[in-house]
Amino acid sequence: METSTRVLIYEDNPDLQASLSQLIAGAPGLSLVGAFGNCTQVTTDVARLQPHVVLMDIDMPGINGIEGLRRIKAGSPNINVVMLTVFEENERVFGAVCAGADGYLLKKTPPARLLEAIGEVRAGGAPMTPAIARQVLQLFPKAPTSSAATADDSAANLSPREREILRLLVEGYSYKMIAADRDISIDTVRSHIKKIYEKLHVRSMTEAVSKALRQGLA
Amino acid sequence: METSTRVLIYEDNPDLQASLSQLIAGAPGLSLVGAFGNCTQVTTDVARLQPHVVLMDIDMPGINGIEGLRRIKAGSPNINVVMLTVFEENERVFGAVCAGADGYLLKKTPPARLLEAIGEVRAGGAPMTPAIARQVLQLFPKAPTSSAATADDSAANLSPREREILRLLVEGYSYKMIAADRDISIDTVRSHIKKIYEKLHVRSMTEAVSKALRQGLA
DNA sequence: CGCGCGACTGCATAATCATGTGATACCTAG
DNA sequence: CTAGGTATCACATGATTATGCAGTCGCGCG
């Protein structure tokens, strides 16, 4: 069912557009479904071409890349959009991220890395140039709140250890993962979870997770 | 700056601590200034050892990595802290990022990449595993233009039927119960859930439930 | 009209999970 | 000292879940 990843390009520089197109078209597993020099028709473009991934230049005449991104996301939030830019300007990083960018690369990114990035974004990752990633992190509000929810005993009568393991379940850990992570036997994990079930009156991981999230036990 | 980047390690798993230590100690341009199994002395540790980069495990007994990070940043905001974790957790990414993490890597990251990451963080970058980077991006408040409050890109385009089944999963239903409830074959339930997993980028019921509850899909 | 897609069904195998029945060890309160 | 709670580990059996592969059927669209 996985055919080929459909890629759409927006890049106003003809040379760069050509080389990007060539790169995509020649890559196994990727198919180029279009390449445009501006975003004026972006909404209809994506509707018609049904891309999985869009490579979007930020600096373009007319509608810029961020606005283009916004329009794509407004209509098709599931399309993965990777922004391309020459410089690492803080302002635009913020705008792009808030508009829902799924990746952010410098144009000087080597071709091989670019192809890799398309794979990553399709797999649910967010390829970013490290320097940009740093900026993204710094955009976060430095929370003074102590969110270290390790010792909150307001919840059920779960022991600290049990609560700890419940948190891991909520994060989607399997028994095996918990055992590995906490460096204990999988049988011990079983044992703890068994008791958690008893105390929460549930009989499956999903019920426990659901209950935990709804009652703020995790 | 000195000739060598001073690296400090916090990792409670002895084996991993040993191999990390060996890796750092043996790397040109890096010098290992310490390795601890817990964060209890983190404030005095960093004051004494003056590291440039700290590799911080997230899951540690006692003071966890995020709290450790917070304490480091409180006193020495210039120290670069790279968080290490075994699996892709969802909840802690937010905590770590808000506490000022400068990088976020999976422990399975190959040694070469880890060394590269230390270089990146020293150079002002933020090395991140792509999947985690994506989570970070998704933490951002989406722009006002998003009228489709369904938000998440990786989650939203579930078909009506898929959404319906996801709701039942959240309620704690098993495959069998869903099949009975909706009067369809259990194989059909499997099929639907398989597709849900693909779209949500998860691989287990608990992950799906967790994601659904957190993103209001249910 | 054919094509793709969503809903649906079936089958098979491997991995995980749920549960029960023990057991050892530490710590703390009685 | 002893009972009770917590944390650890073991072994076993049956149920459930995860995945892959393979189809049918109806519907909207170019």
Image (cartoon, coloured by chain):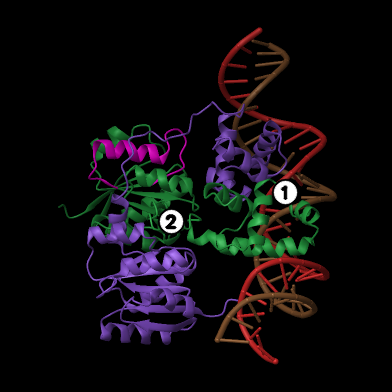
Chain colours: A purple, B green, C red, D brown
x, y percent for residue B93: 42, 48
Residue at 45%, 83% (x, y): give it: A33
| Residues shaded magenta | B56-80
Count of marks placed on residues:
2
Residue D18 placement, left or right of A121? right
According to the picture, the residue beneath numbered tag 1 turns out to be B173
Instruction: Evaluate whether residue B186 shows in this view.
Output: yes
Name the chain under label 1. B
Circles 2 and 1 in contact, beta carbons < 8 Å: no
Q: Is residue A166 above or below residue B180?
A: above
Disc 1: CA contacts within 10 A as few (<14), some (14-19) or many (>=20): some
Corner quadrant of residue B145: bottom left
Q: Quadrant of the N terminus of chain A?
A: bottom right
Corner quadrant of residue A211: top right
x, y percent for residue B191: 70, 65
In this rendered view, identify the residue nearer to me: B19 or A80.
A80
Q: Mark 1 falls on what kind of element?
A: loop
Instruction: Say the numbered circle drawn on residue A156.
Output: none
Mark 2 vs mark 1, foreground winner is: 1
Q: Mark 2 falls on what kind of element?
A: helix
Name the chain under label 2. B
Disc 2: CA contacts within 10 A as few (<14), some (14-19) or many (>=20): many
According to the picture, the residue beneath numbered tag 2 turns out to be B132
Q: Residue furthest left?
A: B1
